[in-house]
């Protein structure tokens, strides 16, 4: 029987069933590492299973992501379609997942666990059929197979939705509300406790020490192709420059191909001299990069994509709050679980003029901005990885 309190003995043996290559450059890979490390810090025995998928890479999460403590990662050996030309590219993921499920069934029979934790519906049936209690953490909802998916969710001990809109939609599908919880992503506050001052951080990153720096720190796209609003931010920079607002823009993140695309856009807008593109940086560099900004921007396009209407709970927002810098953010429905006007200056998604006005207000009214910063710092205390996982692992 699983204890109702996470802190209560005995410690749980938890298997985290990873569906993808690990480690990787994807944000979800880091998120899974943070979740597992937090459960270890809370006193549990955690092992992550991963599929055989292409080139073997070192599996120590501490080396890959700087998370502490580390935890064992078991690569389950099975047929790997990425190593042969016999499986067409369009079918490699399907075939690889099928063989991974077979390997996973064998592993689960030989390694009984108190709890199975996963974030991919691809492995849900395998996990549920094992007979062990299951927690499913959802970052999006499947587009097909709704009836079977709902049935499997109702067999889970808990289904964690990243946002309230996601929970509402899943409940409307027929998942029992008693099984549903809402928990966004989170942040490790330790690296942010003793960050350098604004001036010191600007010197570290060789930024203009005179003009206010408006920063964007994070991936430029999601799911490889969905733009996250950097184009709208550049258009807002153009409007600020036309109004005579003194500032410098700093775009930190990749992929490199998208950074080059946005560099060309800045050139076309005539603001190339005002915007610096840093490229992707390491996770350990993020706190000092955020500390170097006078304001932090979270733009978004005008879009009905489920990512923006239902699913997004970006790591970036929690890092922004932890950095104790003024935030300007697009008012997206899934962000309202965390952000409101008391912690961030909100603007209309996909509206460069609204974004520019919000940025100008933050720069011109520093006392009001600082009040929101302090409120944001208090709020993020409940959004650490440990606090998040404590709430999730209470199964009563």
Image (cartoon, helix red, strand yellow):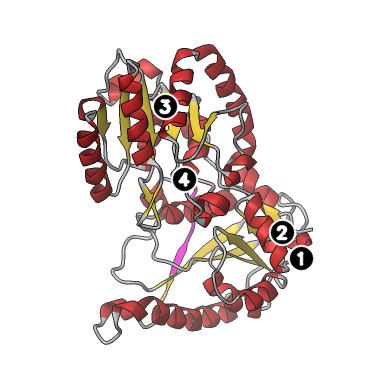
In this view, the mark in front (3 or 2): 3
Q: Name the residue rendered at 31%, 67% in the picture.
A: 56
How far from the left and from the top, in percent, is residue 304? 51, 53
Instruction: Give the alpha-carbon distance from disc 3 to disc 1, as whole Å.
Output: 43 Å
Give whichever of 371, 238 is nearer the camera. 238
Stretch of the chain drawn in magenta = 67-74
* Side (left or right) of 205 relative to 32: left
Q: Secondary structure at mark 1?
A: loop
In this view, the mark in front (4 or 2): 4
The residue pinned by badge 4 equals: 302
* Side (left or right) of 363 relative to 88: right
Quarter of the C terminus within the rendering = bottom right
The answer to whether the residue labelled 1 contacts the one labelled 2, judged by CB atoms less than 8 Å apart, is yes
How far from the left and from the top, in percent, is residue 134? 66, 68
Q: Is residue 172 above or below residue 41?
A: below
How many C-alpha atoms fall within 10 Å of the one at disc 2: few (<14), some, or many (≥20)? many
How far from the left and from the top, in percent, is residue 136? 62, 64
The residue pinned by badge 3 equals: 356
Q: Secondary structure at mark 2?
A: strand
Instruction: Give the alpha-carbon distance from disc 4 to disc 1, as whole Å.
Output: 32 Å
Instruction: Give the alpha-carbon distance from disc 4 to disc 2, as whole Å.
Output: 29 Å
User: Is residue 8 inside the magenta stretch?
Assistant: no
Which mark, residue 180?
2
| Marks 3 and 2, the one that precedes in the sequence | 2
Q: Main secondary structure of the magenta part?
A: loop
Which mark, residue 176?
1
């Amino acid at each position: 029987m699983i204890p109702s309190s996470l802190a209560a003995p005995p410690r749980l043996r938890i298997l985290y069933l990873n569906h993808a290559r690990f480690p990787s450059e994807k944000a979800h890979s880091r998120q899974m590492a943070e979740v597992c490390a937090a459960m270890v810090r809370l006193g549990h025995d955690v092992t992550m299973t991963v599929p055989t998928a292409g080139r073997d890479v070192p599996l120590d999460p501490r080396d890959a992501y700087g998370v502490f403590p580390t935890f064992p990662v078991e690569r389950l050996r099975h047929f790997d379609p990425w190593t042969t030309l016999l499986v067409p590219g369009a079918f490699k993921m399907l075939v690889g997942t099928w063989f991974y499920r077979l390997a996973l069934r064998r592993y689960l029979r030989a390694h009984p666990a108190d709890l199975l934790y996963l974030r991919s519906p691809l492995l849900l049936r395998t996990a549920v059929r094992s007979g062990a209690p299951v927690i499913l953490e959802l970052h999006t909802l499947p587009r097909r197979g709704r009836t079977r998916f709902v049935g499997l969710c109702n067999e889970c001990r808990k289904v964690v939705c990243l946002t309230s809109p996601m929970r509402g939609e899943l409940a409307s599908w027929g998942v029992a509300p008693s099984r549903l919880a809402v928990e966004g992503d989170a942040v490790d506050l330790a690296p942010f406790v003793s960050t350098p001052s604004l001036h010191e951080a600007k010197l570290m990153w060789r930024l203009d020490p005179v003009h206010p720096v408006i920063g964007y720190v994070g991936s430029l796209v999601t799911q490889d192709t969905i733009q996250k609003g950097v184009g709208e931010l550049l258009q807002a920079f153009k409007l600020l420059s036309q109004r005579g607002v003194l500032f410098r823009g700093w775009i930190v993140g990749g992929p490199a191909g998208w950074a080059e695309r946005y560099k060309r856009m800045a050139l076309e807008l005539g603001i190339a001299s005002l915007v610096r593109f840093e490229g992707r940086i390491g996770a350990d560099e993020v706190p000092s990069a955020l500390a170097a900004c006078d304001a932090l921007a979270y733009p978004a396009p005008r879009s009905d994509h489920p990512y923006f209407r239902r699913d997004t709970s970006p790591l970036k927002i929690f890092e922004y709050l932890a950095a104790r810098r003024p935030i300007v953010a697009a008012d997206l429905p899934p962000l309202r679980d965390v952000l409101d006007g008391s912690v961030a200056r909100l603007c209309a998604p996909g509206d460069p003029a609204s974004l520019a006005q919000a940025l100008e207000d933050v720069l011109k009214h520093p006392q009001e901005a600082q009040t929101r910063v302090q409120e944001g710092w208090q709020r993020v205390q409940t959004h650490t990885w440990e606090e998040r996982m404590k709430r999730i692992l209470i199964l009563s």
